[in-house]
Image (cartoon, grey):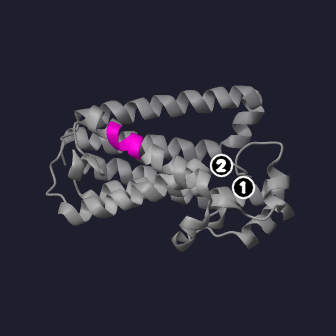
Amino acid sequence: MDGDLITLAAANAAFVGSHFAMSHPLRAPMVGALGEKGFSLAYTAVSFAALAWVYFAFTAAPPADLPGSGEAGWLIATALTWLAMVLLAGSFMGNPALPTPLAEQQARAEPRGVFRVTRHPMMWAIGLWAISHMVLFWSTRTMITAFAMGTLALVGSRLQDGKKAKLMGEAWGEWESRTSYWPRLGRIFSVGAVPLVAGTVLWLAGQWIHLWRAGIPAGLWRWIG
């Protein structure tokens, strides 16, 4: 394997591994040693350092070195990214997985919006984004990075279920009983107007940024640009 790709794989492994380690086995000892604020600062510093390494390793790795999946791949990727943006747009409203004093109250409430699709809309948004890039089969660097980010999101959400069950007890158990880890995509149009509209705006904006920054016409720009 190309040396730059090995570096990229190591950077992604460091980013994902540090997240898993600091979120689970190392969290308690780090909080004990540094306090909550110190832990948050350390977590943020390590995460940004690892992410910066991923960024620079990604830009150094060979672009467009795979044959691609053609128009079928672009159609699938475009649809997946729209689903991802809708889930992301609705994930900030009433999410008991986020650190908020209302978490227990939200967990006991009837699931609404994107939580009718999955209890981990933010994580599945990242996961679907990752899958959409892997479907394109565009470059090895993209495959490595997308696989890493998808693993972080989808395995991380499973681990989060266990952590939240310990922290929130019965409330999280109620939330799990009324929601699904796996996305029920047939319900996407029942999430409400706000996530659908906001997600579509994010989807269109993301395609424009992709063209501007990467120089690759993604999504609708591929056919109307």
Are the two marked residues, 2 and 1, in contact with CB atoms closer than 8 angstroms? yes
**Residue type of the residue flagged with mark 2:** His
Q: Residue at x 29, y 32 (%)?
A: 213
Res. 61 visible in picture: yes
Q: Is residue 206 magenta?
A: yes
Pick the front one: 34 or 59: 59
Res 58 → quadrant: top left
Q: Which residue is mark 2?
A: 24
Q: Tell me which secondary structure the magenta stretch mostly adopts.
A: helix
Q: Nearer the viewer, mark 2 or mark 1?
A: 1
* Badge 1 amino acid: Lys
Q: CA distance from mark 2 to mark 1?
A: 8 Å
Q: Which residue is mark 1?
A: 163
The answer to whether residue 200 is magenta is no
- In the picture, the disc for residue 49 is none
Instruction: Tell me which segment is drawn in magenta.
Output: 204-208
Bin the neighbour count of mark 1 within 10 Å (Cα to Cα): few under 14, some 14-19, many 20 and up: some
